[in-house]
Image (spheres, grey):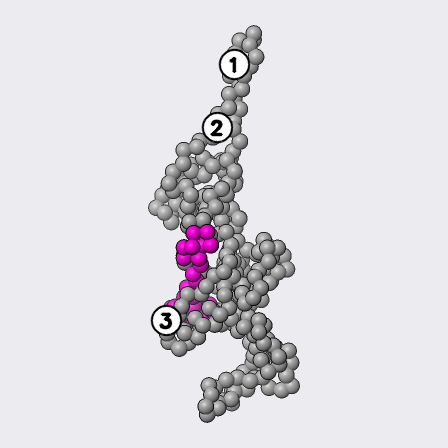
Amino acid sequence: MPGGQYLCPECNKPVGIRIPEKRRAHFFHIPPLGACALNPANGAKGEGHQHALAKHFLYAWLKKWLSGETTIAPAIEGKCSTHSRSFAIEIPKPSPYQVEKEYRIPSGRRLDVAVLNEDGRVSMGFEVFHSNHVGEDKGAELPARWIELRAKSIISSYSQLLEGLAPDPLLAVRWARYDDPPCCKNHKRFVPAPPTQVRIPVPSSYQPETVVIPPPTVEMSEDSDLLAASGAACSMGITPKEFAKQYGKKIGASEHWVLQRLLTYGVAKGDWRW
């Protein structure tokens, strides 16, 4: 509304409103102009402007969806580079929630946008890609669930939402191992327990021999999904018993069954640890 007092979400400086006859109404930075990525007139063009705009659009969309202002969630689509198969990545919806921009994680790194759960932990982190990908060193320090989204797809999809159209999916370019596509899940998240050595009594005139009994090797069709989910739970600090209760409820199995399958792959039963 003209005459209102508004602040730029990037630099927190005052902005005014222009309503031209032949152009769309828009905000402008009130002089004196400082450095701001959302002010093209200040020379901040290219990646800085696109990146900042996409970051604010993603932040605004998540806020609208999590608060219930819109029921349309940001749909994320990735594509497996190995099998060329598209797959969907679901965004968690914690309650209560918090959405932060430029969220600093314990290592000192920053996430462009982060969704936090009720205890302040990162439920899912987001990085916006325009021309420079997240480096391997940064990716190794990010939370268990983070995803890198293409800036152009964020801007285009959120604009469609504002215009009352069905938004296209946001395009993922990189993601954490937690969200690997089903065709490429890394099933070797646990190292099986080493073979158990059992000495069999024999007459003293013979050299005692060692019989090696390997751990159970019978695999079930459900084990691949189980190992992928349990690997993520391990990285998030969830104990095997907590995981068994949650996962069993999700797939309709008993907690005992899940724990027995985990034992097969080397999970310690004594105090139930990975």
The crowding category of the residue bearing disc 1, from other C-alpha atoms within 10 Å (few below 14, some 14 to 19, many at least 20), is few
Q: Quadrant of residue 77?
A: bottom left
Q: Which residue is mark 2?
A: 214
Q: Earlier in the sequence, mark 1 or mark 3?
A: 3
- C-beta proximity under 8 Å, tags 1 and 2: no
State the residue at coordinates (57%, 12%). Answer: 207
Q: CA distance from mark 3 to mark 2?
A: 55 Å
Residue 114: where, in percent of width, then height? 53, 63
Q: Secondary structure at mark 3?
A: loop
Identified by mark 2, the residue type is: Pro
Q: Inspect this view and state whether residue 64 appears.
A: no
Residue 20: where, in percent of width, then height? 48, 91
- C-beta proximity under 8 Å, tags 1 and 3: no
Question: Mark 1 or 2, which is nearer the eye?
Answer: 2
Identified by mark 3, the residue type is: Ala
Q: Which residue is mark 3?
A: 166
> Residue 201: which numbered mark, if any?
1
The crowding category of the residue bearing disc 3, from other C-alpha atoms within 10 Å (few below 14, some 14 to 19, many at least 20), is few
Q: How many marks?
A: 3
| Membership of 73 in magenta stretch | yes
- Please provide the residue range marked out in magenta: 59-87
State the residue at coordinates (40%, 77%). Answer: 163
Between 152 and 141, the residue placed more toward the observer is: 152
Residue 24: where, in percent of width, then height? 46, 86
